[in-house]
Amino acid sequence: MKRILVTRTDRIGDVVLSTPVFKSIKSSFPSVSISVLVRPYTKDIVTNNPNIDEVIIYDPEGEHRTIRGLLKLAKEIEKRNFDTALILFLDFKVGLLTFLSKIPRRIGPGTKLAQIFLTDRIKQHRSKVDKHETDYNLELTEILGAKPIRQSDIYIPDEITKKVDKLFLSLVTRHSSLITSIVGIHPGSGGSARNWKPERYIELAEKIINKTATTVFITGGPAEEKLVDGIVGNIKGKAFKYISYSGLKELAAVIKRFNVIVGPSTGPIHIATAVGTPVVSIYCPIYVCQPKRWGPIGSNDIAIVPDVPFCEKCIFEKCEYYDCMDRISVHMVFKEVAKRL
């Protein structure tokens, strides 16, 4: 094995939980060239990573949406002469892409129709949630003979670190009595799982401000600005707002400055683990969403789930436990935040 293409073409958190694969392969096979195929909006997760030699962009909603676009990308990939493709998230188009790229060995989970494009099928039933997503990813690397390293990471360029340092320095200068330790709250989930109500995040922020000598930042992506504004505007006390208009690298640098971050099952929670910020996360009891598969993996992280039976899907008011998310009290979350401060 000389040149390998690793593909992970879904969401932010999924890509973060795949970064242990790159470290594992490079540590076991230092001379192997590793290229990574990701979507445009997740590329910041993998750029500047010393374990990755090249990042290739796959845009299924844009230039690679049509078969002509897919064939063009396949030709570009074919020129790189990969001998192995490791497909961490398999769908039909990605399977077809690696086949059309004439990569001789194609490894992936053998559980979908797209497995017809694979040469090596690893039986995984991820919906059964018998292990963490990180471990499912690492399981695929073991067929290569790589020793698994269960540690996610994101590499932040010095210029972005300096930019964020200036941001925090300016806040210290203007609000020196406020800036001590910092708790980040990321209330948005992108609809990936059930979440706390905004009122709970507001109450938590107020309790942190009133009970500890701590500054609160409410963070969000560009599509979450309305949610963030609604929370910041209703907090009794001073809270700062940060929207990640400048990309995921800058968001990662901001999160790295936090002493703790609170949020639901979403990408920034996994970014926090990758940069070493302790996580207090809020998870719903839907079976496929549970922390056993999707929880943060840091040694000082915790995922809180309502004390109710797991369910196949939320049926809202028809459920005898609705709204189970209210069973996660502000006090429960605050207690875990305080421990990590």
Image: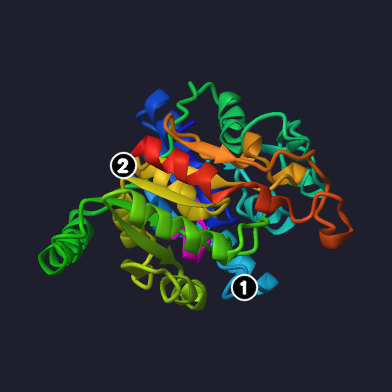
Mark 2 residue type:
Pro
Mark 1 residue type:
Glu
Q: Which residue is mark 2?
A: 50
Residue interval drawn in magenta: 37-43
Let me know if residue 159 is in the magenta part.
no
Mark 2 Cα-neighbour bin, 10 Å: few <14, some 14–19, many ≥20: few
Mark 1 Cα-neighbour bin, 10 Å: few <14, some 14–19, many ≥20: few
Q: Quadrant of residue 135?
A: top right
* Residue positioned 30% across, 57% down in the render: 254
* Residue positioned 42% across, 59% down in the render: 205
* Quadrant in which the C terminus is drawn: top left
Q: Is residue 96 above or below residue 333?
A: below
Q: Which residue is mark 1?
A: 61
Q: Classify mark 2: helix, strand or loop.
A: loop
Q: Position of residue 267 (x, y in %)?
A: 51, 54
Q: CA distance from mark 1 to mark 2?
A: 29 Å
Let me know if residue 39 is in the magenta part.
yes
Q: Position of residue 1 (x, y in %)?
A: 49, 30
* Residue positioned 56% across, 35% down in the render: 134
